[in-house]
Amino acid sequence: MLEYPPKFRIGSIDFNAASFDEAIKCILAKAAVRDGGGTSFHFANAYNIALAENDVKYQEVMNQGDYVFADGTPVVWAGRTMFPNQTWERVYGPDVMASVLGAPDSDSVRHYFLGSTSHTMNRLQFQLSRNFPQARIVGYDCPPFRNPTESELRMRDERIRESGATVVWVGLGTPKQDLEVQRLAQNLPVAAMAVGAAFDFLAGTVPQAPRWMHKSGLEWSYRLAREPQRLAKRYFWGNPQFLKSVVKHRP
């Protein structure tokens, strides 16, 4: 029986303390089957914590998640400081997606992609066919950038069900993707994964920060420099809110 990595409160969100390899093991185990209920996976960073601190409903959604892994280096640092006897490693959404797509002996895992634009999705499908030819991709959907109707959600669920997908990768942006992952896990027998910008990164439409910036916690500065208008609030408001939340909920 698969055991859940233990959860600990960092800021306003309960995180699973786990290594990257442990997280991949959990995901593959859930993604390999299509019976029983669904499972939700979230990859949360400082911005998710900032949002949850200021939005009780979003906080409840995140803390109802089956798995919530530390996607950001500052979250890992906070976990290691407050809970030093636990294993804290960065479980970065794009790396998770690449590892699961490239996992050996994963014939039973069937992938469905939800989110982004048609242009990015076409590029993503091309790159995946080149880099992960063994991955079984059974469908994708690029919904419009607005709230879906109940009818559209029912049709979305039916398409996913008919595809035979066991894992649904969701890239709708924060916080929308976290809400959708919880909804999918409640309605379908899939592993639903909120992976943020992973579609853009793996498609090659948006460059990733150098690895040394990931490790040093400076990835945010690289992304801000490339997309200042879109990401200014995320970092100038989110980073101080993250620190406030961590201090407030420190054990």
Image (cartoon, rainbow, N blue to C red):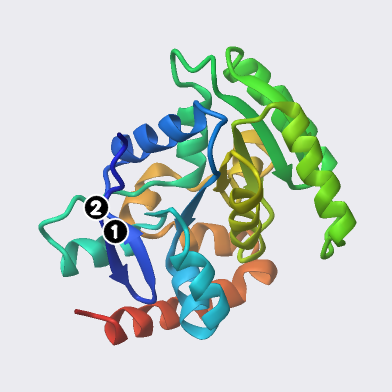
Q: Residue at x 48, y 63 (%)?
A: 221
- Horizontally, residue 44 falls left or right of residue 225, namely left
Q: Position of residue 106 (x, y in %)?
A: 49, 18
Q: Quadrant of the C terminus?
A: bottom left
Q: Quadrant of residue 71?
A: bottom left
Q: 202 above or below 153?
A: above
Q: 104 above or below 140?
A: above
Q: Quadrant of the N terminus?
A: top left
Q: Residue at x 44, y 76 (%)?
A: 239
Q: 221 above or below 41?
A: below
Label 1 belongs to which residue?
A: 76
Label 2 belongs to which residue?
A: 88
Q: CA distance from mark 1 to mark 2?
A: 6 Å
Q: Residue 228 versus residue 175: which sits nearer the camera?
A: 175
Q: Position of residue 199 (x, y in %)?
A: 65, 41
- Horizontally, residue 140 falls left or right of residue 165, namely right
Q: Position of residue 167 (x, y in %)?
A: 59, 35
